[in-house]
Amino acid sequence: MGNSGSSARHDAMLAVIRWRPEHRADEFLETPMDQLFGCNVFNEDKMQQRLPKPVFERLLSTIHDGQTLDADIADSVAIAMKEWAVERGATHYTHWFQPLTGLTAEKHDSFFYPTDRGRAITQFSGASLIQGEPDASSFPSGGIRATFEARGYTAWDATSPAFIYENPNGTVLCIPTAFASWTGEALDKKTPLLRSMDALSSQAVRLLRLFGDTDCTRVNATVGAEQEYFLIDSHFYFARPDLVACGRTLIGSQPPKGQELEDHYFGAIPERVLACMLEVERELYKLGVPVRTRHNEVAPAQYEIAPYFENANLATDHSMLIMSTLQRVAQKYGMHCLLHEKPFAGVNGSGKHTNWSLATSTGHNLLEPGDTPHENMKFLLFLCAALAAVDRHADMLRASIASPGNDHRLGANEAPPAIISIFLGDQLTQALDTIVSGKAGSSAKASLQLGVNTLPPIPRHFGDRNRTSPIAFTGNKFEFRAVGSSASIAWPVTVLNTAIAESLSDIADQIEKTLGKAKVTEARLRTAVKKAIQALYKQHGRIVFNGDNYTANWLKEAEKRGLPNLCNSIDAMNAMLETHNSDMFKSQGVLTKRELDSRHHTRMERYITTLTIEAQMTANLARTVVLPAALRYQTEVAEALAIAQSAGHSTNETDSLLAEIIEMIADLRLATRHLSSQVAQRPNGLEQLGCHVRDQLIPAMKAVRSACDHLERSIADDLWALPTYREMLFVK
Ligand code: ADP
Ligand code: MG
């Protein structure tokens, strides 16, 4: 007979059993890594080869030192870029941008221009490189742009190199761009990110000058984002309307074997999966994305890919490319890549640990404890600046990672709770405690002398790690672990950058005041810095928590400390309306109040829309997939009952089975009716709608799911039309 569920199962199993590599990656195997890496990127090397020297040098000053882009060089760059792209088969170019949808957007234009006598030439001008005008009226703007003034402009971001996107039938030149309204207001994720990087750099450089550093011209936020994802066979994917429409399973009963045996984590990678990963990596190398690490993750069918860190802007663009490449290449291997934070209930979800630090243009990591007392003072000061920033804007950081998907993950004993705190490790915490108490340092192992009587030694090696903390200090960087797997890292990194820029600015003000006009000696500087560290840690030390963030005790303790616990997206997103947050964005020149409000609006709308789609899909599955299967099963059982009765057998057993099924069906219908009535109610106003979704829609969806899952566990397997967890997670 066969239904879509069992045929998907059959096809998926054949796909796994018969899988052989269709195309050997010859090019990959034959091309040495150093030639492959960046071959599709118009990187500095190629610019140097192809651009006149003065043009190249002016461009470099923009890329490295954040100097204003010189529009006069655009024509020259455009010609070189186009020639290079055409040599690599490009027929089209696109401004590649990151609207508030959270995805990337592109609109392709041909290089070809018709000429007289029916011919055409390729042409690409500086003007087309610098600015584009996509018909952008359908991108979210959160009220910034009315449709009658729907113009949006894309503007070349010279700090992220252009690259070539390959397709079997041709290639496209992609130019990373920012996207703004005709009034200059940001409509994307890149513009505020770049602004926040500038703010951070100028405040960090200002502080470094106080330490007598006259060489450093720029401080960049560095970021390495570890991407978690699931891979499942495409047959299963297409047989699950919820995966196709929502990226996660809205119903589905737990398999007898889940992740309890912990036999997947760091286990051997199945051959088809590894083949896919190798091709993903090959494609990413070509795009200059420095991916380094791959391994199995905790849940069955879950994996991770991690790049080497880069400056925050490049890391963001590359993180978007990692996600799209995973999705694209997986399909070539008959698999689908799921980037959702929680595709399967009951097994671990996926995050994107966003490692963050500060690098000077002179090659130093400012969060690396140094070899001299002078360096260590600097280290402690930047560390405390981060503590203060996270404490002041914990609510905004929480808001920056809020999404419907992440709501399933945060606080679920697999990801940090919704309370933002920082793990520092015992040794570093002790060191700071001692500075504040003013007592002499304890004898920490493998420590570094600060050379100041009252400053304790700083531990050099951080043995302890904490996997339950939302933001963990891991030796020379912070790891923002609460970021969701499907998210663009642009927004969380923008918030972190801005908060720390504000904090550095306050600290610089403070130290400048303490030092006054008199000559700055090393001793006076030390005293001023120590005073600043003491004040910062006293005020903001409450953000440090080294214990287990998953325990109920921490919830109580955090409340006592006054740390916000924003359990769901709606509560979290309200932080964007708070004055201390809008003031921060404004003072650092990152977002105006109007721009921030528009982001709040857009995010609320997306949250409500996403959940409304999920709710409708849940009701739809319940009615059109689960209910028919249940009714068929009911008929079969009733028929069996009639046969038994006509043969004169005692039928108590079958009788009660029938009664159970009838009851389960009644539960399902009741829950579904309730869900549909909740979907139909649309209270006025964004805030009210958000609360309705959170308080009514989500519980109603859960009730339907529970009725469906109950039936899935009870009815005949061959009548169940959807691929099950035990298949999707384990057939690989
Ligand atoms: P783990 O799984 O233990 O967290 P990984 O090796 O998977 O470690 O990931 C560590 C990530 O941190 C990598 O992406 C790496 O590039 C990044 N990273 C290391 N140093 C820095 C730094 N200074 N700034 C930003 N990211 C960094
Ligand atoms: Mg990690």
Image (cartoon, grey):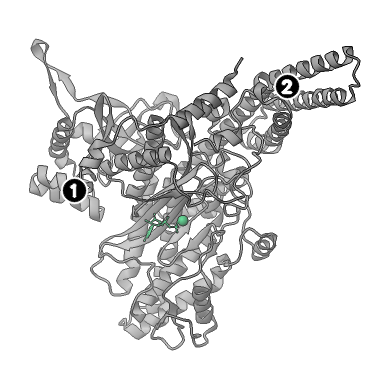
Q: Give the image location of residue 283, x and y in percent.
A: 30, 39
Res. 191 visible in picture? no
Asked if residue 682 is positioned above or below residue 512 in the image, the reply reads above
Asked if residue 536 is positioned above or below residue 299 in the image, the reply reads below
* Element carrying mark 1: helix
Image-based side of 155 in relation to 337, left or right: left
Callouts 2 and 1 close, C-beta under 8 Å: no
Residue 149 placement: quadrant: top left
Q: Nearer the viewer, residue 432 or 4?
A: 4
* Element carrying mark 2: helix
Q: Which label was assigned to residue 110?
A: none
Q: Give the image location of residue 294, x and y in percent.
A: 40, 49
Q: Which amino acid is tagged 2? A: Ala
- Which tag is nearer the camera, tag 2 or tag 1? 2
Tally of numbered tags: 2
Q: Which label was assigned to residue 44?
A: 1
Residue that mark 2 sits on: 630
